[in-house]
């Protein structure tokens, strides 16, 4: 029986050529797998037809946008995950959901190998292959760009020679990856890290210099998940989309960073994640009133480690699973409303309310009626400073000798 390979298919030039390229190099039949993670653009049916037109024996297309929002974006939100303090893991969280569908398709169509279009220099190859190894340990991996010398020029020549139904003239100098959680742009002119991004780079956000009137929004959460916007019930996917639109119009969520790739290279990235950044900001502010201090401090550390694991392709790892359990436990009381103003590139919280809040007005107030017994503070401070005071006494004693 002819060997079969499932290919992660985007519908773009490189993966369209990869169908025939893999076929010629390996003699295998190629099954194209396209997964909708809210990237917008062409319909799955258009992509399916193109895959078949480029020589795929089958095309597996899946609308995974709700699955992605519920099972990938929501855990990212609960973790307030920002890799290196900036990047909301846009591409990093889409790879594992694509991997799930690749493995499912491999089983359905009897494939032995999984192929993806990544280069050998980035994180995405690691995320795909570590994910495949975990969910389908018997499956092999192949990356035509990395392993079968499929360069851009060769891809264009191949497409023209075979008359593939794909545009080869549209020149985009950037490498772009996008989904409902955000958009990542790299390479080209951006590789000079002193170059400011030009306006044409952005698509999810409007330039914040000339914003429309401020937009006040109230986001309601239940156990860490957005459930309503301005009182209208929403699913997680709808919440992200609605905030992509409203925060995007105000230029919220533009990120320009040099980040540390897992493979050891520092790389310049431009991200746009209006919905994700508005949601993370609101969620963090709700946590500030609903999570106990020590749990909150520890959770920040856990969230950082979680982000690194996910960035590094360890979505399906045991440690990531354990940290998920901790984070989930912290979300029990993260229920309530956050009001924020979206304007001029910023999302600023200006109100919060929650039935499960730990904010105690009577303890906090400086007005009369305050229930806090200030006389307790003296003894507390005495004991709190004791250890450092003893050590300082020792320093003076030793230095004096
Ligand atoms: N640097 C980001 C990450 O590793 C984004 C990668 C985007 N991928 C792409 N092919 N442009 O998650």
Image: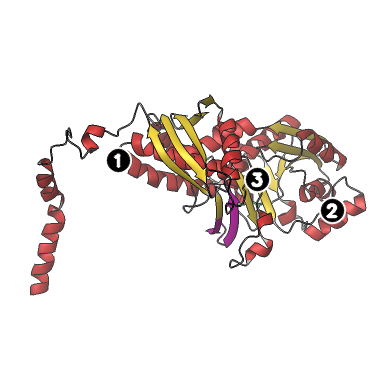
Q: Is residue 368 magenta?
A: no
- Across and down, in percent, residue 184 comes to 62, 51
**Residue under numbered circle 2:** 168
Given residues 325 and 226, the one toward you in this image is: 226
- Seen at 76% across and 55% down, the residue is 148
Q: Is residue 266 magenta?
A: yes
Compared to residue 225, the image places residue 376 above or below, namely below
Residue 295 can be seen in this image: yes
SS at circle 1:
helix
Q: Earlier along the polypeptide chain: callout 2 or callout 1? A: 2
- Seen at 9% across and 41% down, the residue is 375
> Farthest residue in the bottom direction?
401
Given residues 369 and 300, the one toward you in this image is: 369
- Seen at 81% across and 60% down, the residue is 153
Measured in 3D between alpha carbons, the distance from the residue under mark 3 to the one under mark 2, in whole angstroms, is 21 Å
SS at circle 2:
loop
Measured in 3D between alpha carbons, the distance from the residue under mark 2 to the one under mark 1, in whole angstroms, is 56 Å
Q: Is residue 246 left or right of residue 302?
A: right
Q: Quadrant of residue 70?
A: top right
User: From which residue to which does the magenta span run?
Assistant: 256-273
Q: Is residue 370 left or right of residue 359?
A: left
**Residue under numbered circle 1:** 293
Q: Main secondary structure of the magenta part?
A: strand
Q: Quadrant of residue 392?
A: bottom left
Quadrant of image for the N terminus = top right
Number of marks present in the image shown: 3
**Residue under numbered circle 3:** 178
Compared to residue 24, the image places residue 326 above or below, namely above
């Amino acid at each position: 029986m002819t060997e079969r390979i499932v290919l992660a298919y985007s519908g773009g030039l490189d993966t369209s050529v990869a169908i025939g390229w893999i076929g010629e190099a390996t003699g295998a039949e190629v099954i194209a797998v396209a997964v909708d993670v809210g990237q917008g653009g062409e319909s799955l049916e258009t992509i399916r037809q193109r895959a078949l037109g480029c020589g795929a024996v089958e095309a597996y297309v899946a609308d995974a946008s709700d699955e992605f929002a519920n099972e990938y974006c929501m855990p990212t939100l609960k973790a307030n995950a920002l890799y290196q303090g900036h990047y909301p893991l846009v591409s990093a969280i889409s790879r594992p959901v694509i991997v799930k569908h690749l493995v499912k398709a491999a089983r359905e169509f009897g494939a032995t190998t999984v192929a993806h279009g990544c280069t050998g220099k980035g994180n995405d190859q690691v995320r795909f292959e570590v994910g495949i190894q975990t969910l389908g340990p018997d499956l092999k991996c192949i990356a035509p760009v990395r392993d079968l010398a499929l360069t851009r020029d060769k891809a264009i020549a191949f497409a023209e020679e075979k008359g593939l139904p794909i545009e080869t003239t549209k020149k985009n100098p950037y490498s772009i990856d996008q989904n409902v959680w955000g958009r990542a742009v790299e390479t080209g002119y951006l590789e000079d890290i002193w170059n400011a991004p030009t306006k044409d780079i952005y698509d999810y956000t409007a330039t914040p210099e000339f914003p429309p009137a401020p937009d006040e929004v109230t986001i309601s959460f239940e156990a860490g998940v957005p459930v309503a916007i301005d009182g209208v019930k929403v699913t997680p996917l709808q919440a992200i989309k609605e905030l992509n639109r409203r925060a995007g119009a105000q230029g919220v969520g533009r990120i320009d960073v040099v980040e540390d790739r897992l493979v050891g290279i520092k790389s310049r990235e431009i991200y746009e994640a209006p919905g994700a950044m508005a949601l993370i900001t609101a969620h963090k502010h709700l946590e500030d009133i609903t999570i106990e201090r020590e749990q909150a401090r520890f959770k920040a550390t856990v969230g950082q480690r979680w982000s690194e694991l996910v960035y590094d392709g360890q979505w399906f790892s045991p440690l990531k699973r354990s940290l998920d359990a901790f984070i989930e436990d912290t979300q029990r009381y993260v229920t309530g409303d956050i009001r924020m103003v979206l304007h001029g590139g910023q999302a600023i919280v200006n109100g919060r309310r929650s039935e499960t809040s730990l904010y105690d007005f009577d303890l906090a107030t400086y007005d009369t009626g305050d229930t806090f017994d200030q006389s307790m503070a003296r003894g507390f401070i005495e004991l709190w400073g004791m250890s450092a005071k003893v050590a300082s006494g020792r320093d003076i004693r030793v230095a004096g000798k």
